[in-house]
């Protein structure tokens, strides 16, 4: 049984994609570690990388090549200064040398040493081969798969064994919704309390709080940055940033100078239904515009869906509960992480495997569940909200125009956030005993839908809006 922490589901990283950017970045870091383990690191003369399948078809638009190079330099996506990335990549291109782990310069020309191969490897749509050439001519090859949400695996059986060993640390074995509800009932605890007990088997309370605070700080920072940055997004579509204009109309004239003061200021603005819709959409837009600009966001559970959870949590803090504090944030993130893990265990969070239902659908489900618990919902109502949110994303395709995480991806975060709030309200007003569709059934249905979905609708930019809208139209 798979062990997934809330810190696996909510990761800090660089946009625009968890599977196409963060995953390849982490694969590059991992390759360095394996070379060192084999004691051949100092004998390298060249590294070549082949990106397969969906990584090849939309890799350029997702900055896969940039991510691979940054990973091989040993830079950490959690802490690397965003403004330094462009200079690092430019220097590699000009010198045709790559500072491997920032300690060893090796021969490397991005034009020839990063190759995009349209062929799909059998295990997953996002495959990568790292090929190291040693000074004596010997080659070492490792194959990795970016399976969504920044998760990177080598092969299913070896990874499964590692997860199984790690899972022994969790006091509560939870694979699906039925088991989660049974555990809550047996322990007489809420979902967030059960998740916290599992997390405590891996980290101290101080470490948990510090990690969750860092996640929220990053979410708040990305919303703040997106709402205060004007102009067009990079990539060639000339998409105008909309969060800035929307925020300017909504915020009023109250002064502030930090993200925290900004949050307090929003609490003083007008509260009408239209205003709430606009604020929630503004929050979601802001995060995903930062993501589309190779900015730092929280993968939740993916980068393409990174705006949904921050938008819904911010909604709770500035609209529903002006007294909300870190304990509410902690509760929200713990529940969201657990619901995301159920989808990862029973289906997928990779758009390359399941279409956008696996990204926006899952993030909406996570946010709906978390909001429901904060609003006083029972564990049964929490799972009902998660089910409702996903039910109305089933079949959603992934069809980014020009392979960029911009159209329709950014707006879909707005819709996912609004649906999450609506799903929570429906669940809170309902008796779960009357529900006809349990969460586990919708998880299974999502996976079956994913398997039946044509490959052209799975982050390949070969169907849907990606071919229905021409670049000349933009």
Image: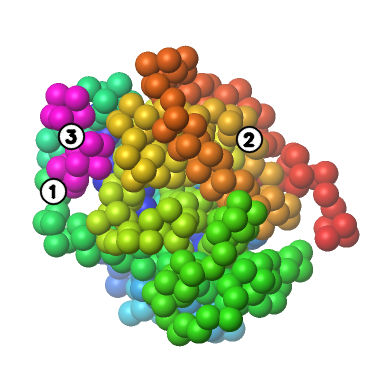
| C-alpha separation, residue under disc 3 versus residue under disc 2 | 34 Å
Give percent across and percent down for residue 264.
Answer: 42, 72
Q: Is residue 456 left or right of residue 280?
A: right
**Going by the image, does 473 lie left or right of 81?**
right
Which image quadrant for residue 103?
A: bottom left
Vertical order, 313 against 354 (above or below): below
The residues colored magenta run 183-199
Please report contact status of discs 1 and 2: CB closer than 8 Å, yes or no: no
**Cβ atoms under marks 3 and 2 closer than 8 Å:** no
Q: Residue at x 43, y 15 (%)?
A: 434
User: Who's the residue at 62% across and 69% down the image?
Assistant: 250
Residue 196 x %, y %: 19, 45
Task: Return the residue at label 1.
Answer: 200
Q: Main secondary structure of the magenta part?
A: helix
Read off the residue under disc 2. Answer: 396
From the viewer's side, name the closer residue of 120 and 200: 200
Location of residue 355 with respect to 315 vertically, above or below? above
């Amino acid at each position: 049984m798979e062990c997934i922490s809330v810190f696996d589901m909510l990761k800090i990283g660089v946009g625009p994609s968890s599977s196409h950017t963060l995953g390849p970045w982490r694969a590059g870091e991992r390759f360095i570690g394996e070379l060192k383990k084999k004691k051949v690191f100092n004998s390298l003369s060249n590294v070549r990388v082949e990106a397969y399948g969906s990584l090849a078809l939309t890799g350029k638009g997702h900055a896969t090549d940039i991510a691979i190079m940054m990973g091989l330099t040993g830079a950490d996506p959690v802490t690397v200064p965003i403004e330094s990335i462009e200079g690092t990549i430019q220097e590699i291109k000009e010198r045709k040398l790559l500072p491997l782990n920032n300690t060893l310069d090796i021969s490397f020309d991005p034009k020839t040493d990063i190759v995009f191969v349209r062929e799909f490897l059998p295990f997953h749509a996002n495959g990568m081969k790292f090929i190291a050439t040693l000074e004596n001519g010997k080659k070492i090859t490792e194959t990795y798969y970016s399976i969504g949400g920044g998760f990177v695996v080598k092969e299913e059986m070896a990874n499964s064994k590692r997860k199984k060993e790690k899972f022994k640390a969790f006091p509560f074995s939870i694979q699906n919704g039925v088991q989660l509800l049974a555990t809550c009932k047996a322990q007489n605890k809420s979902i967030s309390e059960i998740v916290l007990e599992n997390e405590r088997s891996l980290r101290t309370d101080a470490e948990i709080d510090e990690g969750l605070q860092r996640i929220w700080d990053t979410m708040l920072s990305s919303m703040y940055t997106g709402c205060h940055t004007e102009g067009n997004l990079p990539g060639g579509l000339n998409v105008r940033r909309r969060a800035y204009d929307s925020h300017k109309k909504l915020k009023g004239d109250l002064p502030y100078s930090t993200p925290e003061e900004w949050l307090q200021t929003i609490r003083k603005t007008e509260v009408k239904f239209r205003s709430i819709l606009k604020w929630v959409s503004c929050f979601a837009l802001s995060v995903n515009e930062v993501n589309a600009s190779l900015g730092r966001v929280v993968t939740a559970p993916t980068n393409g869906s990174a705006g949904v959870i921050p938008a819904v949590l911010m909604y709770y803090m500035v609209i529903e509960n002006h007294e909300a504090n870190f304990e509410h944030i902690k509760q929200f993130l713990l529940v969201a992480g657990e619901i995301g893990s159920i989808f990862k265990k029973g289906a997928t969070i990779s758009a390359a495997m399941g279409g956008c239902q696996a990204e926006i659908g899952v993030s909406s489900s996570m946010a709906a569940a978390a909001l429901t618990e904060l609003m006083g919902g029972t564990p049964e109502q929490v799972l009902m909200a998660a089910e409702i949110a996903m039910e109305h994303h089933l079949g959603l395709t992934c069809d980014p125009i020009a392979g960029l995480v911009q159209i329709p991806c950014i707006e879909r975060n707005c819709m996912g956030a609004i649906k999450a709030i609506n799903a929570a309200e429906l669940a809170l007003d309902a008796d779960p005993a009357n529900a006809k569709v349990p969460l586990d059934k919708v998880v299974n249905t999502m996976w079956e839908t994913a398997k039946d979905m044509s490959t052209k609708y799975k982050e390949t930019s070969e169907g849907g809006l990606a071919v229905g809208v021409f670049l000349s139209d933009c």
